[in-house]
Image (cartoon, grey):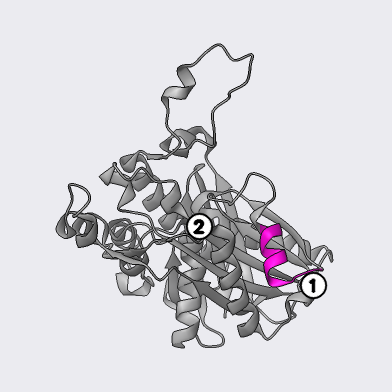
């Protein structure tokens, strides 16, 4: 299985750190020194399926494939338009992919790699020949805009890839995993249990916004990146010097710098664009991939590693030959 096309879409509205300082007690120095983020894109009305559809159309165009020829659509998102239907089904209608099997997965910032793994298994088992994989988020509707420790981190956006069955090298290896015992470190409640038989109102004291334990996530993220990269190379003939780029989940520059130090590698090997988009969760890796593809920095035969970590807590790592 290999990637044959990439696409991305972000809202037009760009919010700089200085803009946030006008609506809350923060500053560009406070945000950038702690995260490396300079600005982020924020939706002014577009929902997750809108962003996902526009990224999907770009990926289809880049792959030179018609939507009607897509067999499978997977949308990785934690901010769907609806509980029902899936965002993927809405995307299917929007782009005209009338022959696709469509569903969502929820694995937070690792969702894109989970979706790639699922698609790979669909293709290996001959259930489909190609797939459209989308990471899409409108996190601006989930953050608490009064909590400066979290709302400054996140942005909205979508990235997509088209993958197909191929005899050529492509997705060389992929691993995913989770540590469910740490689920409370990053959470966003969906809704309250409210019905005529509920007598305990204590649950309703929690709001429906993103909550995060920064220290717990930081430690998990650094370990995930370092262990993921070491393990994905362990049973191959490649070493870190053979890797052209490492494309991490774009969450925090300090996480990436700490991981690079533990791995004893040049931070320049990591492709970083979080300063422009912030943390777009499951969309961050496919947005970065499309940016790299459009810039022409990826050449045929290049070896790259994708590595992600997120709520769940979940993680994923993939070795790819471009």
Which label belongs to residue 129?
A: 1
Q: Earlier in the sequence, mark 1 or mark 2?
A: 1
Q: In which quarter of the image is residue 254?
A: bottom left
Residue 173 can be seen, yes or no: yes
Q: Is disc 1 surrounded by few (<14), some (14 to 19) or many (20+) residues within 10 Å? A: many
- Helix, strand or loop at disc 1? loop
Q: Nearer the viewer, mark 1 or mark 2?
A: 2
Going by the image, does 66 lie left or right of 37? right
Rendered location of residue 274, percent (x, y): 35, 65
Magenta span: chief secondary structure: helix
Query: Quadrant location of residue 277?
Result: bottom left
Residue 69: image location, x then y, percent: 79, 76
Most extreme residue toward the top, as rendered? 199
The circle drawn on residue 22 is none
246 is higher (above) or lower (below) than 21: below
Tell me where the magenta segment starts and ends, as one range. Answer: 88-98
Residue sitting at x 52%, y 77%: 303
- Asked whether, in this view, residue 192 is left or right of residue 219, the answer is right
Q: Position of residue 313 (x, y in %)?
A: 49, 43
Q: In which quarter of the image is the C terminus?
A: bottom right
Q: Which of 33 and 147 is in front in this view?
A: 147
The count of marks equals 2
Which residue does the numbered mark 2 point to in the structure image? 137
Out of 229 and 40, give the one closest to the viewer: 40
Callout 2 secondary element = strand
Name the residue at 29% across, 42% down.
147
Q: Magenta stretch: residue 47 in it?
A: no
Distance in Å between CA atoms under marks 1 and 2: 27 Å
- Crowding at dot 2, Cα within 10 Å, few <14 / some 14-19 / many 20+, comes out as many
305 or 94: which is nearer to us? 94
């Amino acid at each position: 299985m290999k990637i044959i096309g990439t696409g991305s879409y972000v809202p037009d509205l760009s919010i700089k750190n200085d803009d946030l300082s006008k609506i809350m007690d923060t500053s560009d120095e406070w945000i950038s020194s702690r995260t490396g983020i300079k600005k982020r894109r924020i939706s002014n009305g577009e929902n997750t399926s809108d962003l996902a559809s526009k990224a999907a159309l770009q990926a289809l165009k880049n792959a030179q494939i018609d939507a009607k020829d897509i067999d499978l659509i997977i949308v990785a998102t934690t901010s769907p338009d609806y509980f029902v239907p899936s965002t993927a089904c809405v995307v299917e209608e929007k782009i005209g992919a009338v022959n696709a099997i469509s569903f969502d997965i929820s694995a937070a910032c690792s969702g894109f790699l989970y979706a790639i793994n699922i698609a790979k298994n669909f293709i290996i088992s001959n259930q489909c020949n190609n797939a459209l994989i989308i990471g899409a988020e409108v996190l601006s509707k989930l953050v608490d805009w009064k909590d400066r420790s979290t709302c400054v981190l996140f942005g909205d956006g979508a990235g997509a890839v088209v993958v197909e069955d191929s005899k050529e090298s492509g997705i060389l290896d992929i691993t995913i995993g989770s540590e469910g015992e740490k689920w409370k470190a990053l959470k966003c409640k969906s809704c309250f249990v409210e019905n005529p038989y509920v007598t305990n109102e204590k649950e309703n004291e929690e709001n429906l916004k993103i909550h995060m334990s920064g220290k717990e996530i930081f430690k998990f993220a650094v370990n995930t990146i370092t262990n993921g990269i070491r393990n994905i190379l362990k049973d191959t003939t490649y070493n870190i010097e053979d890797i052209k780029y490492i494309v991490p989940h774009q969450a925090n520059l300090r996480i990436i710098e700490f991981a690079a130090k533990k791995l004893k590698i040049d931070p320049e090997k990591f492709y970083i664009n979080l300063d422009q988009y912030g943390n777009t969760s499951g969309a961050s890796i496919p947005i970065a991939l499309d940016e790299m593809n459009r810039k022409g920095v990826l050449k045929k035969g290049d070896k790259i590693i994708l590595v992600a970590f997120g709520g769940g807590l979940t993680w994923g790592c993939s070795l790819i030959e471009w």
